[in-house]
Amino acid sequence: MCWIRLDDMVNNDFSRITLLVIVYICFLLVNTLAYAEDDSTSEKMTTCRLASQILGNKQRVCVFVGANNTQYREYVPYDAGECPRQYECPYRPNEKPFNLKNVVKSIKDQFK
């Protein structure tokens, strides 16, 4: 009788350990799949360089230009300091080319 109970305990402990290992492996697998980057959904980024900064209405507008005519504007509070010289912005290749003067003029017109 004593041996049967000991065998049951060993089998029971083995099944618990096996179950815990399986649950842990499934947990790792789900986390890996959840955080894996999918190239089709992730947005590509590029390094954009500061083209101009405009001050107005207690706001600073930073205009950035990147690879293949990528354009990006960042609106920040005036007291946040100067615009960074480089910025990681979304890669949007072959956008309609722009004239920096016209962009600056249109932004200034928005503040009026």
Image: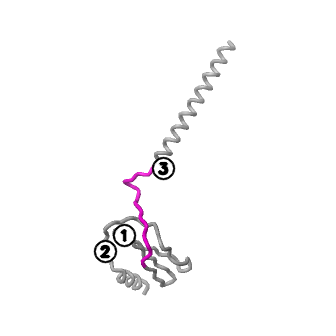
Q: Amino acid at mark 1?
A: Thr
Residue 63, horizontal then vertical, whole percent: 42, 76
Judged left or right of residue 64, residue 15 is right
Residue 29 belongs to magenta span? no
Nearer mark to the viewer, of 3 and 2: 2
The residue at 40%/72% (across/down) is: 72
Q: Which residue is mark 1?
A: 70
Residue 56, horizontal then vertical, whole percent: 48, 84
Which dot marks residue 35? Answer: 3
Q: Which image quarter holds the N terminus?
A: top right
Mark 2 lies on a secondary structure that is loop
Nearer mark to the viewer, of 3 and 1: 1
Q: Quadrant of residue 43?
A: bottom left
Taking the view exactly as shown, the residue that stands out farthest to the right is: 2
In the foreground, 48 or 59:
48
In the foreground, 44 or 57:
44
Q: Which image quarter holds the C terminus?
A: bottom left
Judged left or right of residue 92, residue 24 is right
